[in-house]
Image (cartoon, grey):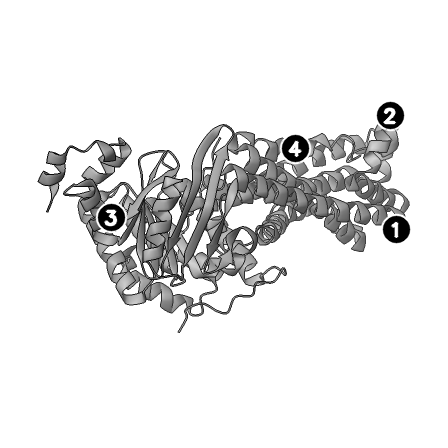
């Protein structure tokens, strides 16, 4: 009698295989205190820094005084985007660091399923990291990002999806160019920060940059966040823009990852990973 | 041309149904030709060695068979399935081990095996890991992180991973590389017993000639990416007039087949 279950060979990703890879990274997180600390450390430090800046500016800026949570919401939501992208890229690089890709891709695991596992782990890591910082902000600065209500869910979802898309692209680049390109994982996302309007309205940007901002889901999310905080209105138009852009971004993220994967198979980079 | 004739002639003497069928594969990396128009078949329940010096194309050939590397030209079928188009249909039926591919070091041996058992869809994971840990004597370090094991222990764990799905085709890249003689002998004995028990077809790349003589009933010789000879160890010993495969290996590596003096051939007869 065969020891393996009947294999389904269709296009639909196997949840069993996705779960197997999520389990692998959960084992890793569970066994490594520094990795868990790293998840919470930076979002918390950022939140504390911007919390004190808020405390200072509330007395010196009428704009901040109108909605004191605007900077803290910005920093926490920015960290959703950053952590989400970093989560995908770091989890992928764990496979490269451990020289495990050869075993993975000789197993029935499809690259698309690896992508699904990466974004699942990214979600878990982001919830731990940013969730922890958001909870600490409540007693520390008497500000709860959860007071944004249901719109918070829309903002969170859009930012995490955008992070997945960029994370998949970065993972593909690291696979293609080797671990020498791993610093991309930490710096890539910051290229969009100035034009996402995290801490200021998009109209602050020069007109030509506002056009660039319009093709970033993140800029619509942060505009929507300010609309909720300042005007107490939820802008459905901004949400729709962000969702439509994110559909395209995520598709492009997966397509680029799969394309880089194919290049890696041509160049023999699945067995010989390194710089 | 002559290389292909060697392959063709040998193939005709073997069973017609093949587990692996490689047809005119080549792999170029820019100007470097790593594998050059290689063809061969692997018959069921055989153990075939890919032999050759460093840079001969053994690992590149294995990587193409596994689908980790796409050939520049040629076709590969495993169990009758085109590996370039449909590899996911056959991946559950094969497995591999290589000293150049690790397992996650922070995960314990049991965690590693559990992850791969899930990837392969093993029905009773606990029972399978227990059976393998008994067979490969890895029970005492199941709870230890893989990264803390010795080279010999790691080899056994990677073999356990390679046997999780009871593969019908097992590809082994230098299975005893960097092992001490005692551990290497244990691994060869285990592979021998496993093949006898399960009828698994094995294809291994190796530098170790005593390993090849002991385990393999078919040897494919590669040099500079080309298939230069093929036969059973006995056939190759007779053809080169040598007493052991190490001498055959050196002859082939140094292109000495046609330079053998008649006296040498006489002296080398068993």
Q: Nearer the viewer, residue B57 or A185?
A: B57
Q: Is residue B111 visible?
A: no
| Residues tagged by mark 3 and mark 4 found on one chain of the structure | no
Residue A132 horizontal side relative to residue B268, left or right: right
Q: Residue at 24% of width from left, 35% of height from top?
A: B257
Q: CA distance from mark 3 to mark 4?
A: 50 Å
How far apart marks 1 and 4 lie (CA) works out to: 29 Å
Give the Cα distance between marks 4 and 2: 22 Å
Residue at mark 3: chain? B
User: Which residue is painted at 87% across and 27% down in the image?
Assistant: A208
Residue of label 1: A236
**Measured along the vertical axis of the image, is residue A178 above or below residue B102?**
above
- Badge 1 vs badge 3, beta-carbon distance below 8 Å: no
Q: Secondary structure at mark 3?
A: helix
Q: Position of residue B33 (x, y in %)?
A: 45, 32
Q: Is residue A189 above or below residue A33?
A: above
Front residue of B27/A247: it is B27
Give the number of the disc on residue A19.
none
Residue with the mark numbered 3:
B212
Between the C-alphas of marks 1 and 2, the distance is: 25 Å
Q: Going from the N terminus, do you reach mark 1 or mark 4 first?
A: 4
Q: Earlier in the sequence, mark 4 or mark 2?
A: 4
Question: Mark 4 and mark 2, same subunit?
Answer: yes
Residue with the mark numbered 2: A206
């Amino acid at each position: 009698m065969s020891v393996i279950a009947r294999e389904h060979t269709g296009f639909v990703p196997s949840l069993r295989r996705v779960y197997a890879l999520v389990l692998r990274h959960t084992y890793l997180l569970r066994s490594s205190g520094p990795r868990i600390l790293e998840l919470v450390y930076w979002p918390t430090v950022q939140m504390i820094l911007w919390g004190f800046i808020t405390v200072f500016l509330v007395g010196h800026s009428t704009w901040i005084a109108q909605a004191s949570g605007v900077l803290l919401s910005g920093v926490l939501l920015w960290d959703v985007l950053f952590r989400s992208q970093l989560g995908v890229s770091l989890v992928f690089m764990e496979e490269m660091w451990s020289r495990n890709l050869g075993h993975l891709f000789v197993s029935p695991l499809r690259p698309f399923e690896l992508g699904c596992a990466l974004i699942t782990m990214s979600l878990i890591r982001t919830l731990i990291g940013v969730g922890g910082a958001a909870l600490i902000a409540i007693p520390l600065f008497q500000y709860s990002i959860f007071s944004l209500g249901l719109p918070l869910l829309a903002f969170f979802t859009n930012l995490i999806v955008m992070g997945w898309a960029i994370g998949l692209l970065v993972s593909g680049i690291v696979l293609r160019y080797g671990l020498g390109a791993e610093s991309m994982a930490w710096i890539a996302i910051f290229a969009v920060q100035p034009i996402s309007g995290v801490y200021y309205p998009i109209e602050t940007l020069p007109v030509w940059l506002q056009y660039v901002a319009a093709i970033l889901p993140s800029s619509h999310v942060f505009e929507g966040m300010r609309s909720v905080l300042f005007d107490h209105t939820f802008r459905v138009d901004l949400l729709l823009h962000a969702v439509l852009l994110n559909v395209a971004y995520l598709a492009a993220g997966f397509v680029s990852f799969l394309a880089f994967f194919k290049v890696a198979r041509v160049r023999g980079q699945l067995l010989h990973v390194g710089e | 041309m002559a290389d292909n004739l060697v392959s063709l002639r040998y193939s005709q003497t073997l069973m017609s149904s093949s587990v692996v069928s490689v047809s005119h594969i080549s792999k170029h990396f820019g100007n470097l030709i790593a594998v050059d128009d290689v063809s061969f078949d692997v018959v069921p329940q055989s153990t075939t060695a890919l032999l050759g010096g460093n840079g001969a194309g053994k690992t590149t050939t294995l990587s193409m068979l596994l689908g980790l590397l796409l050939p520049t030209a040629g076709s590969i079928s495993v169990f009758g399935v085109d590996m370039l188009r449909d590899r996911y249909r056959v991946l559950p039926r094969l497995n591999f081990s290589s000293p150049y591919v690790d397992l996650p070091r922070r995960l314990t041996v049991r965690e590693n095996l559990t992850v791969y058992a899930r990837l392969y869809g093993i029905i009773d994971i606990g029972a399978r890991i227990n059976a393998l840990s008994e067979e490969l004597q890895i029970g005492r370090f199941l709870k230890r992180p893989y990264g803390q094991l010795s080279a010999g222990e790691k080899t056994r764990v990677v073999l356990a991973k390679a046997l999780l799905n009871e593969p019908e085709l097992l590809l082994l890249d230098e299975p005893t590389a960097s092992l001490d003689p005692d551990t290497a002998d244990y691994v060869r004995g285990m592979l021998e017993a496993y093949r006898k028990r399960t009828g698994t077809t094995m294809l291994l790349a190796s530098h170790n000639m005593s390993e090849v003589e002991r385990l393999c009933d078919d040897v494919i010789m590669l040099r500079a990416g080309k298939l230069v000879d093929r036969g059973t160890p006995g056939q190759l010993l007779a053809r080169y007039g040598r007493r052991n495969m190490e001498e055959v290996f050196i002859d082939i590596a140094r292109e000495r087949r046609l330079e053998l003096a008649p006296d040498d051939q006489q002296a080398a007869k068993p």
